[in-house]
Amino acid sequence: MDDGKGQFRYADNLEALKALKNKFPEHGGTFKVGEEVEVKGSIFRVKSIKPKEIRLRLLRRKKR
C-alpha cells in the first residue's frame, strides 16, 4: 500500500491491510505483485514491491 508519505507498506492479509489503511488515512491505494495496472494508456504488470519502489513490466498490446 502507498502510505501517502513516500513509502510502500506491506500487508500479508486483509486484517493487516485494514489496519494500515486506518493508520495512514492519506494512503494512495494498494498494489499487489502480479496485478495489471494502466498508466497513461499503457498496461503494466507489478513485478515486485519494495519500501521505496515498485517494479513494473510493460505488457504487449493485444491485437484487435
Image (tube, grey):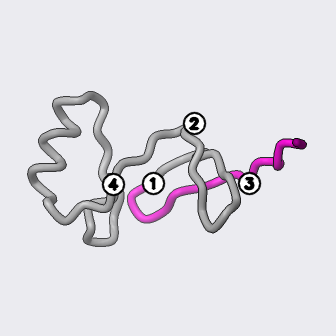
Return the x and y of residue 36 as percentages of the image width and height: 59, 43
Return the x and y of residue 30 as percentages of the image width and height: 36, 48
Residue 7 lies in what quarter of the image?
Answer: bottom left
Labelled pair 2, 1 in contact (Cβ < 8 Å): no
Q: CA distance from mark 1 to mark 3?
A: 18 Å
Give the SS element for disc 2.
loop
For label 4, the residue is: 29
Return the x and y of residue 24 as percentages of the image width and height: 15, 59
Q: Kindly identify the residue that appears in the image at 27 percent across and 68 percent down.
A: 4
Give the SS element for disc 3.
strand
Near mark 4 (Cα within 10 A), the count class, few <14, some 14-19 or many ≥20, is few
Of marks 1 and 4, the one in the foreground = 4
> Tag 2: residue type?
Gly
Name of the residue lying farthest toward the bottom: 5
Question: Along the polypeptide, which appears first: circle 2 or circle 1?
Answer: 2
Residue 50 lies in what quarter of the image?
Answer: bottom left
Question: Along the polypeptide, which appears first: circle 4 or circle 2?
Answer: 4
For label 1, the residue is: 50
Q: CA distance from mark 4 to mark 2?
A: 16 Å
How many numbered discs sit on the rendered protein?
4
> Tag 4: residue type?
Gly
Question: Along the polypeptide, which appears first: circle 3 or circle 4?
Answer: 4
Question: Along the polypeptide, which appears first: circle 1 or circle 4?
Answer: 4
Magenta-highlighted residues: 50-64
Give the SS element for disc 4.
loop
Q: CA distance from mark 1 to mark 4?
A: 15 Å
Give the SS element for disc 1.
strand
For label 3, the residue is: 58
24 to the left or right of 52 = left
For label 2, the residue is: 34
